[in-house]
Image (cartoon, grey):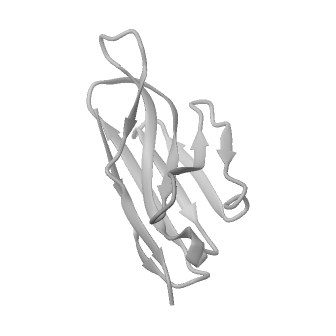
Amino acid sequence: VQLQASGGGLVQPGGSLRLACAASGSIARINDIGWYRQAPGKRRELVATIASAGRTNYATSVRGRFTISRDNAKNTVYLQMNSLKPEDTAVYYCSAEILRTSTYYARTYWGQGTQVTVSS
């Protein structure tokens, strides 16, 4: 199983970016899937997650500005980021709890990260 993130880049304050993360491999089911971020010198923190039935959870710092969604048919999660601030600058990682085919227990997988830089 692999998670491939894309969509990062450099954007000015107030701008928008859309991240995508596609899961591939022998996947039977994806439970929770979401985004975390890690800024230089800081711990990795939750940004947003979405359950298989669509229930969402957001960090307080991004609520109202970021929107997480998922396409179950494509095994893909998206993060629409609006009104970006310099403090949103970080490496963004996608993470998913995945049950592989022919296994009995789901486990957590991580993508490789994509850099988001908010600067003028």
Q: Quadrant of residue 15?
A: bottom right
Note whether residue 6 is visible.
yes
Q: Residue at x 56, y 51 (%)?
A: 45
Marker count (numbered): 0
- Rendered image quadrant of residue 27: top left
Question: How far across and how far down the image is residue 25, in percent?
Answer: 26, 31
6 over 22 or under it: above or below: below
Q: Which residue lies furthest to the bottom in this view?
A: 120
Task: Specify whether 80 is left or right of 56.
Answer: left
68 or 110: nearer the viewer: 110
85 with respect to 115 (left or right):
right
Q: Is residue 21 left or right of residue 42?
A: left
Q: Is residue 64 left or right of residue 107?
A: right
**What residue lies at 58% left-to-right and 83% top-to-bottom?**
13
Compared with residue 85, is residue 57 higher up or lower down, i.e. above or below? above
Residue at screen point 42% across, 79% down: 10
Q: Is the residue 5 above or below the residue 96 in the image?
A: below
Is residue 7 visible to us here? Answer: no
Residue 77 percent across, percent down from the top left: 47, 46
User: Residue 64 versus residue 46: which sits nearer the camera?
Assistant: 46
Q: Quadrant of the N terminus?
A: top left
| Residue occupying image coordinates x 58% and y 72% | 87
Residue 94 pos. (x, y %)? 43, 47
- Where is residue 89 drawn, in percent x and y? 50, 71
Q: Quadrant of residue 109?
A: top left
